[in-house]
Image: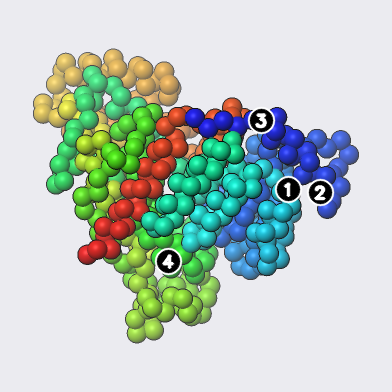
Amino acid sequence: MIKFFYPALFLILTMSCATKTEQPPSGYVPKPVQLVTLDPGHFHAALVQKTGYPEVDSTVYVYAPEGGDLKLHLDRVKAFNTRPESPTNWNEQVYTGTDFFEKMIAEKKGNVVVLSGNNKKKTEYILTSLKNQFNVLADKPMVIDSKGYQELKEAFEVAAANKLLLYDIMTERFEITTMLQRELSTLPEVFGTLEKGTLQNPAITKESIHHFYKYVSGNVLTRPAWFLDASQQGEGIVDVMTHLVDLVQWECFPEQVIDTTEIKVNKAKRWATDMTLSQFKAITKLEAFPDYLRSNVSADTLLKIYSNGEINYQVKGVHAKTSVIWKYQAPEGTGDTHYSIMRGSKANLVIRQDKDQQYKPTLYIEPVGKTKDANYEKTLNEQMKTIVTKYPGVELKSTKAGWEVVVPKKYEEGHEAHFGRVTEKFLEYLKNGNMPAWEVPNMIAKYYTTTQGLEVSLKK
């Protein structure tokens, strides 16, 4: 288990505050956590700051190259500061020299580096930051290929040696239907035991559908052109797939350590999404494809983006399948969707998010064999009391195949709010000086799965 000494953290902060170019206001007392945002090219970097945190200093030091990515990031943070309801009060101190990374290392004005941007550079940023006594909170994916995976393993060794934390942002653990799916799977009287499954019929399946054209914080999201380059963003099989592989581990083997020797990739495939030049213009605000995308462009008008992938694999002998699909734009009134099934010996736990669910994730309990068995229903109602104690207001509604788990609106926070939840969890680990023993080995196992999946898919 990684240890972290909080008094030392406060001392580092106190020393760094003396180098500020601006004088703090009268009576200012520095807080123990000082964020540094490095090269924020993805909107997730700003979402970490959609809310404030009592232990985090309001001044954030930003080191990045001048350009559109930085401007979009600062505009998003400014919008959080100026919104009418619950505005934040972030104070962004920006350095844009070409030596921005070296400057960040030399100045050491903070103790937590937030990373969400070009994934080609991310693993290097992670490793170097840790070597220079920064904790790291990194957006997924932390690696996009096998070479990066080896560097990531080194990064965790450095973190342990330097008594620092390295943590990735797994927002989907805070989606209420996923949380309840996990909770119900731990009730043997309801779920039974997790099936082992087969290659053709896995014990757990997770499918995620995303869209390039989307709204974030009420505005159409501008995508950087490099986001559409698999060599920089990473293919779908190593990018969004990170969330799905994480959830397989987190739900099927809660709080259990997973070793890479317990993982076997059986099959994997990748395929492209086609995007026209006009569609490209709409989401990037650029008039032409950059040169680095030209190798994936046909007839000067059609860009092929390898954003889709599927992995069939085993973890501790359990068959799993994870799939990521990217489309250009969701139909009106819809958005990104998620499908998940966990197959138990007594019941299947299924999350659907289609038209019948009004495109909202909805969890179902569907007994295996005799549906609506009176004894099972009695047991289910009795066992649900433990769920309701933890999540007051959750109810069951009868369906043809079993029951729908009805979730009160107070639990429907949305994807953007989940970034605050993850950050709070990271801050809790930082304050306590450790993470659960399973977190680090399971992060390593997760990225082993995704990078091995990519390797297998490229062999075809």
Q: CA distance from mark 2 to mark 1?
A: 7 Å
Q: CA distance from mark 4 to mark 2?
A: 38 Å
- As shown in the figure, which amino acid type bears the numbered disc 4? Ser
Which sits in the foreground, 352 or 97? 97
Going from N to C along the chain, the mark reached first, 2 or 1, is 2
Q: Are marks 2 and 1 in contact (CB under 8 Å)?
A: yes
Mark yes or no: residue 455 visible. Answer: yes
Residue at screen point 31% across, 67% down: 272
Q: Are marks 4 and 2 in contact (CB under 8 Å)?
A: no
**Secondary structure at numbered mark 3:** helix
Q: CA distance from mark 3 to mark 1?
A: 17 Å
Q: Which residue is mark 1?
A: 109
Q: Which residue is mark 2?
A: 19
Q: Which residue is mark 3?
A: 6
Going from N to C along the chain, the mark reached first, 3 or 1, is 3
**Secondary structure at numbered mark 4:** helix
Q: Are marks 3 and 1 in contact (CB under 8 Å)?
A: no
Q: CA distance from mark 1 to mark 4?
A: 32 Å
Q: Residues within 10 Å of mark 3 (few under 14, many from 20)?
A: some
Q: CA distance from mark 2 to mark 3?
A: 21 Å
Residue at screen point 29% across, 45% down: 206
Q: Which residue is mark 4?
A: 231
